[in-house]
Image (cartoon, grey):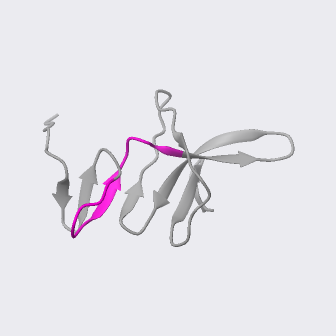
Amino acid sequence: MDVQSVQEPWRIGPWAACHFPQTVDGAYVLAGHVHPVYRVTTRVDSVRVPCFRFGAVCAVLPAFGSFTGGARAHEPVEGEKVFLVVEERVIAV
């Protein structure tokens, strides 16, 4: 496997890949690090679900491994979209 280390932001067409969510002039940022989760609560249970968060200038991607705790996601603000990943489905909040 050929793995290369690159400097941030790594520009890929109209996107910029960054470890931390941030703003990059002229690009839409795809970031990780905080790996958001969304708490879904019912009358009997509460679970943390990985989620994608898409804002005006940055998307924060989920993680699915057992070593990633995930940052609790707040309710979407105006203009922001949140998508939960549940089993093999993606569900808009």
**In front: 15, or 58?**
58
Q: Position of residue 82 (x, y in %)?
A: 55, 60
Q: For the point 46% across and 27% down, which residue is it? A: 67
Residue 73 spot, x, y in % from top left: 56, 49
- Whether 7 is drawn above or below 14: the answer is above
Residue 19 vs 92, above or below: the answer is above
Q: Position of residue 26 (x, y in %)?
A: 21, 70
Residue 37 lies within the magenta run: no
Q: Nearer the viewer, residue 72 or 2?
A: 72
Residue at 42% x, 50% y is 61
Q: Is residue 74 left or right of residue 27?
A: right
* 92 to the left or right of 4: right
Name of the residue lying farthest toward the top:
67
Q: Main secondary structure of the magenta part?
A: loop
Where, by quadrant of the figure, is residue 23 drawn? Answer: bottom left
For the point 56% across and 65% down, the residue is 77
Q: Farthest residue to the right: give it.
A: 43
Region in magenta: 22-36
Check residue 28 for magenta coloring. yes
Q: Position of residue 76 (x, y in %)?
A: 58, 62
